[in-house]
Image (spheres, coloured by chain):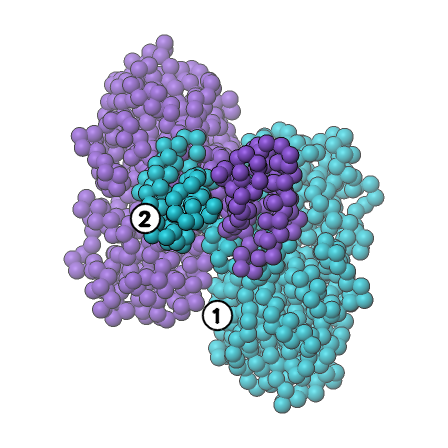
Chain colours: A cyan, B purple
């Protein structure tokens, strides 16, 4: 046993591991660990809406379980500063006031995020460094350096009363990292000597064979591109990828080029990273966009957002000739230094097409060498399993098929099949030093954020939005005399998103005629019953319009009683 | 000169090439060639809607140019039977009655397609074989065998009064094709001797280096999978890929397994292809699904649709446990023998996830070896350029970046840069034996098909659908006295897709109050002006709701005058 701290393994205690996000889906990572009266959260991330979540801005984990147990919550431990690991913090921290632990850069990104919501960490900010140890309730957390597509990422060794839990966070192995900070293999190997009860490890790239290449090869490729370029070079990358920005800056400086940042999030990252000492630019290298626009093009490198083709990003606007300050000219080279996140492929392709149309040379795609992944491939994953030799294993961070593939890798290196848990969000996994058991589930799921509304858009609203999106809406307005049931005014018909009204007058006139007949049928000889009239109008109109157009707009009969 | 037919090169004549679809986008291929009084079309395809084309079923080319020139239209020549090459035929043929030329399998698919629209080729069907020559107006067309992901595909050598035009159609080189029908390299080389004025060639895979592998490697991989499977095997592939189905059938027959088709389009393809002699199954190999369900699982292979994860396809339904006849059981193997078309990545991923959840072993993705592309990669494209040595070159079939990459390949093998035309739909390219010129554009673009409506959904309707999809609709109904301008009834407020109404009573009550105030402001002391009142209500409500929810539902004020 390497150290004695917090090792009083109390066999009467049980460790509960409750994933609340990030399993079987993309993003919004959150994991609760609890033992007796103490609970900690690892990460609190958001995800972006799925295609069918119409009009939704972001998706956060359902935190009911956390809020129900808030008296036991001792703190939040962050592995790194990506949105899918920190983005739900504002929604957590406005309900509970707890310490937040993370590296300096991670906390830098968190502060920026909270400020947008009018929040501030204040005394709850607990900056940590790799190899630091902190005690949070009955847990002792030791942080270890990992490599990832954001600087200052860490994994966690969590010493619990039941045994040692190792959580990799998002990681890859980079033997030649840009900042010289190599993954802490020593510490990882030491954990194995101590005995690892449970490993949780990043599954994102479990489908990929081999090893993920070093970030440094991107730098080499960028140098080549910069050297060959006769005009300006624009490099689009993830706004949080400080290492990549460092490589852009280094390559530019070497070749006597100047670098300007375009797009709010790139500017923010550069500010935070420079201030905290994570990004180093030789004096005079960084200029602002207006200065850059005055330089000869071959001396200019621009770093922009929009590597995912996001419609409102700087690169998209530039591609659409809709940017205030940057206009593509023939001779410009654009480097799209990213691989599309699933779902964004078309946006990226469209952006590339527009850039080509404006005469740029565009360097993009998997064969171009200007991007490497930030996540470990299967050989690295097997190495982590072999280095730590855990008794129990939970693959985390990935869609369901990634978890399955990662579980297969674990079994292939000799982890007992019954000790590998392909978990789902909301599952409670309970561990003693000897046993791992799946218990009853807790509340979990998505909470949809739309504008200021958190959780107020649910199935009904989304179903309506879907119908409106497909075939639009048709509103039939009638005024009916309360006594006689006679039509006093109308029917008026208003439609949106259904047919082009100016060319469909005939159809809408016929619709009105059908409505009149429906009202007559429903009310003839009887005292008027609004519900019956509405139902008759709705059914009649729906049937008529489907027959004539094969469309199913939402039909809304509105009856005014006068 | 190899032959004398139709070679009277009349230097006073000019050849016009007018791409009407398929350039700078996915799908809906259509190209018009005309010379003097004669025009022919090459292909008439559809595409599937882009994400922002809400509620649209399919997209066809704007055929105004064709209809304006229908007196000159002598026929339609088809390269192969994929939807993006034949899918617009029903919309063309209901307006013009012209001969249609294609191989037997291609015409088989066309007949099926037309039947769905209550149309029939009748005497206009002109089946052709590779190396056949047909004269259409002043054009003489010679067909040559190409390989592609559908059987019986051909390229076209079009002898025109101006010179020889070679059009590859969609193609790849398969040195070991499943049906033994190798690409007709001999003929292609012969065209070069004759002198090729213009080459049009498939750009889909111009981004990929190297060669596209033979379809036969998929067969080898399928054999391995079938041999290792202890339970049923489901193979999902494109419904039109007869070669792949042949390989499934062959591998199954070898191992004593039976094959059943699941899904209407697979059943249709197998029927057409078997009847026309393109698919050969040993007696007793094919069974129907009910029979298959009675066999021991290790003897069953199912071919299904849904390799693109299409929500209503057989495979999706099976994955969601929503199929009438097929239920996934642990021990089943599912082979997804396709690469997602851009935009479908998420659907495919989700289907794979669900299949894993139900306990299937799923074989999918680029590393799995169960799919090869049907399009030539860069080395093949360069070979075609070098074999034909055309004077002029137009890259076709591809998004804009593919055309650019293909143009670069052409220049790299020595085609004069000024003779390479990266064209766009609607561009008129005019050729003489010596010159190629870009002329004025003709009408071109998308026509959106939604239900029975062809072209009636345009920008306005789509913009409304987008707003409805994002934030829903809020309808404010008022009855106002025509004389006094006083509110007689209402305001009533109806919303859909905006907020969950039951939990937003307070918000909607306040909205009504704002509407009352707005009416008062707009009509106070003046005779009521409906437009002014509507505008005031709309602006007031929009502002109020944005402030309270940060959402922008469509606001529809409806005023009844009573």
- Figure check: B379 above or below A422: above
Q: Residue at x 40, y 68 (%)?
A: B358
The residue where tag 2 is placed is A524
Pointer 2 indicates a residue of which chain?
A: A
Element type where label 2 sits in the image: loop
Q: What residue lies at 38% left-to-right and 25% top-to-bottom?
A: B64
Which residue is situated farthest in the right direction here?
Answer: A283
- Choose top left, top right, bottom left or bottom right for residue A193: bottom right
Q: Quadrant of the N terminus of chain B?
A: top left
Instruction: Count residues near mark 2 (Cα–Cα under 10 Å), then give few for <14, some for 14-19, many for 20+.
Output: few
- Residue A229 position, x and y percent, is 66, 35
Pinpoint residue A228: horizontal percent, then vertical percent: 65, 36
Q: Nearer the viewer, residue B251 or B493?
A: B493
> From the viewer's perspective, is B257 left or right of A421?
left
Residue A306 visible to the viewer: no
Nearer to us: label 2 or label 1: 2
Toward the top, the furthest residue is B12
Where does label 1 land, which residue? Answer: A408
User: Does dot 1 land on a helix, a strand or a loop?
Assistant: helix
Name the residue located 25 percent from the left edge and 59 percent from the top edge: B260
- Whole-Å distance between the Cαs marked 2 and 1? 70 Å
Seen in the picture, residue B179 relative to B328 is either above or below; the reply is above
Along the polypeptide, which appears first: circle 2 or circle 1? 1
Residue B302 horizontal/vertical position (percent): 29, 60
- Is B6 located above or below residue A271 in the figure? above
Instruction: Give A161 or B93, whichever is nearer the viewer.
Output: B93
Residue A68 higher or lower than B372, as above or below: below
The foreground one among A532 and B419 is A532
- For label 1, the crowd category at 10 Å Cα-Cα, with few meaning under 14, some 14 to 19 and many 20 or more, is some
Q: Position of residue A162 (x, y in %)?
A: 64, 84
């Amino acid at each position: 046993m390497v150290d004695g701290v917090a090792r009083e393994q109390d066999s009467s205690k049980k460790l509960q591991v409750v994933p609340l996000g990030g399993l079987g889906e993309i993003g919004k990572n959150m994991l609760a660990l609890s033992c007796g009266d103490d609970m900690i959260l690892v990460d609190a991330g958001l995800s972006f809406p799925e295609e069918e979540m119409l009009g939704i801005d972001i998706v956060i984990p359902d935190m009911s379980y956390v809020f129900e147990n808030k008296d036991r919550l001792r703190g939040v431990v962050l592995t790194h500063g990506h949105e899918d690991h920190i983005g739900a913090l504002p929604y957590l921290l406005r309900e509970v006031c707890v310490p937040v632990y993370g590296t300096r850069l991670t906390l830098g990104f968190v502060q920026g995020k909270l400020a947008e919501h009018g929040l501030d960490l204040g005394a709850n900010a607990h900056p940590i460094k790799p190899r630091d140890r902190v005690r949070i309730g009955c847990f002792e957390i030791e942080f270890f350096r990992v490599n990832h597509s954001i600087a200052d990422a860490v994994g966690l060794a969590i010493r619990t009363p039941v045994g040692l839990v190792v959580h990799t966070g998002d990681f890859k192995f980079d033997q030649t990292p840009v900042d010289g900070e190599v993954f802490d293999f020593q510490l990882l190997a030491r954990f194995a000597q101590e005995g690892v009860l449970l490993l949780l490890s990043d599954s994102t790239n479990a489908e990929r064979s081999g090893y993920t290449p070093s970030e440094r090869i991107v730098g080499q490729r960028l140098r080549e591109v910069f050297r060959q370029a006769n005009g300006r070079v624009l490099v689009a990358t993830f706004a949080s990828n400080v290492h990549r920005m460092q490589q852009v800056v280094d390559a530019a400086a070497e070749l006597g080029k100047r670098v300007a940042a375009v797009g709010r999030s790139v500017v923010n990252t550069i500010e935070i990273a420079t201030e905290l000492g994570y990004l180093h630019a030789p004096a005079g290298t960084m200029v602002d966009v207006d200065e850059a626009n005055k330089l000869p093009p071959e001396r200019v490198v621009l770093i922009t957002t929009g590597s995912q083709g996001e419609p409102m990003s700087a690169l998209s606007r530039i591609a659409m000739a809709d940017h205030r300050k940057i206009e593509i000219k023939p001779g410009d080279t654009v480097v799209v230094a990213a691989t599309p996140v699933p779902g964004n492929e078309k946006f990226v392709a469209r952006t590339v097409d527009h850039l080509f149309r404006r005469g740029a040379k565009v360097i993009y795609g998997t064969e171009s060498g200007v991007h490497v992944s930030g996540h470990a491939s299967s050989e690295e994953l097997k190495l982590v399993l072999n280095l730590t030799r855990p008794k129990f294993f939970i693959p985390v961070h990935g869609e369901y098929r990634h978890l399955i593939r990662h579980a297969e890798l674990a079994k292939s290196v000799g982890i007992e099949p019954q000790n590998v848990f392909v978990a789902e969000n909301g599952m409670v996994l309970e561990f003693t030093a000897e046993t791992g058991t799946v218990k009853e589930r807790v509340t979990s799921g998505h909470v949809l954020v739309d504008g200021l509304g958190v959780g107020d858009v649910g199935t009904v609203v989304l179903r309506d939005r879907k119908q409106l999106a497909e075939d639009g809406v048709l509103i039939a307005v009638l005024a009916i005399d309360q006594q006689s049931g006679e039509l006093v005014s109308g029917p008026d018909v208003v439609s949106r998103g259904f047919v082009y009204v100016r060319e469909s007058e005939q159809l809408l006139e016929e619709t009105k005629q059908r409505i009149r007949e429906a009202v007559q049928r429903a009310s003839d000889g009887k005292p008027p019953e609004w519900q019956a009239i509405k139902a008759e109008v709705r059914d009649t109109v729906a049937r008529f319009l489907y027959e004539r157009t094969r469309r199913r707009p939402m039909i809304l009969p509105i009856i005014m009683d006068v």
